[in-house]
Image (tube, rainbow, N blue to C red):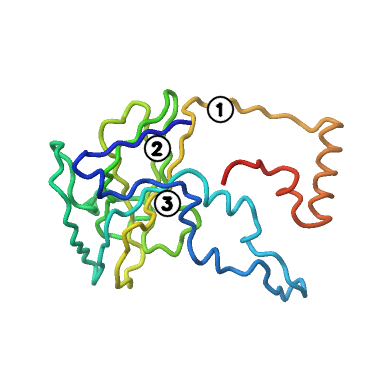
């Protein structure tokens, strides 16, 4: 999959580039213990740090990064970002804009406040037939906001930036959201509708099911060693 990012030439030396998600894993994941004692089991058990599906979800795709420090105090957002005047007409200069609360009326995640919107300074071009799935950075409940998930047909919509709306969830947050904070995790998805096929196990599948379950229960690392794709990480 070839993904092309473009930006205003006046900002090319200023903007943080989108990066592979695997390069911006949070410190808390690195610091997590690999095992923790379980009262129920009476022994140490593996934590999610050793769960490949958990980690692979966090490393999938690429991240859009906050382009500058944003200070937050009492619900107000402030930044000092001295960038060149974009050469492209209609191009944003602010890292954030807003959606009024009424645009979220009836949504279960609405909190009665305006939603922030992370302005994008990169256009994204995907190959024909693919769309861009943009969501909150996976398993990142430590972030004080929650991105609103969306899908954009970026094989066609590729000449303007995609903006990423988010709900500010931590009303007690006081401090700085630093430059480089991942704000959106993105990955291409095929637009063609899948064909759903339903079958009962035949004899071979019953044997395979029983053997796979037995192998998984027999010891750790079965999925990682036998089934996990050894893709570049």
Q: Which residue is mark 3?
A: 136
x and y percent of residue 202 in the render?
Answer: 83, 30
Horizontal side, residue 135 vs residue 198: left or right: left
Q: Earlier in the sequence, mark 1 or mark 3?
A: 3
Q: In the displayed structure, does residue 84 sit left or right of residue 114?
A: left
- Location of residue 207 (image quadrant): top right
Q: Are marks 1 and 3 in contact (CB under 8 Å)?
A: no
In this rendering, position of residue 74 left or right of residue 31:
left
| Whole-number angstrom distance, CA of label 2 to CA of label 3 | 12 Å
Residue pointed to by mark 1: 194
Q: Which residue is pictured at 37% across the width and 33% down the height?
A: 4
Dot 2, crowdedness within 10 Å: few (<14), some or many (≥20)?
A: some
The residue sitting at 42% across, 23% down in the picture is 128
Checking the image for residue 151, the label placed there is 2
Query: Is the residue 36 above or below the residue 19 in the image?
Result: below
- Distance from the alpha carbon under mark 2 to that under mark 1: 16 Å
Q: Which circle's residue, 2 or 3, is located before the other in the chain?
A: 3
């Amino acid at each position: 999959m070839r993904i092309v990012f473009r930006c205003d030439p006046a900002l090319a030396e200023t903007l943080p580039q989108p990066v592979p998600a695997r390069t911006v894993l949070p410190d808390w994941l690195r610091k997590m213990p690999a095992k923790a004692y379980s009262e129920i089991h009476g022994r140490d058990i593996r934590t999610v740090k050793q769960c490949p599906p958990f980690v692979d979800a966090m490393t999938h795709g690429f991240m859009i990064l906050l382009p500058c420090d944003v200070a937050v105090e009492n619900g107000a957002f402030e930044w000092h970002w001295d960038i060149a005047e974009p050469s492209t007409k209609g191009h944003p200069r602010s890292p954030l804009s807003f959606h009024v609360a009424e645009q979220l009326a009836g949504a279960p995640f609405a909190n009665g406040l305006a939603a922030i919107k992370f302005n994008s300074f990169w256009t994204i071009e995907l190959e024909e037939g693919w769309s861009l799935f943009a969501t909150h950075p996976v398993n990142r409940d430590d972030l004080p906001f929650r991105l609103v998930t969306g899908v954009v047909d970026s094989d066609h919509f590729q000449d303007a930036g995609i903006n990423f709306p988010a709900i500010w969830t931590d009303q007690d947050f006081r401090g700085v959201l630093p430059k480089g904070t991942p704000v959106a995790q993105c990955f291409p998805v095929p637009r063609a509708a899948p064909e759903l096929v339903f079958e009962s196990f035949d004899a071979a599948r019953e044997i395979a099911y029983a053997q796979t379950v037995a192998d998984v229960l027999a010891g750790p690392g079965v999925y990682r060693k036998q089934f996990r794709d050894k893709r570049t990480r």
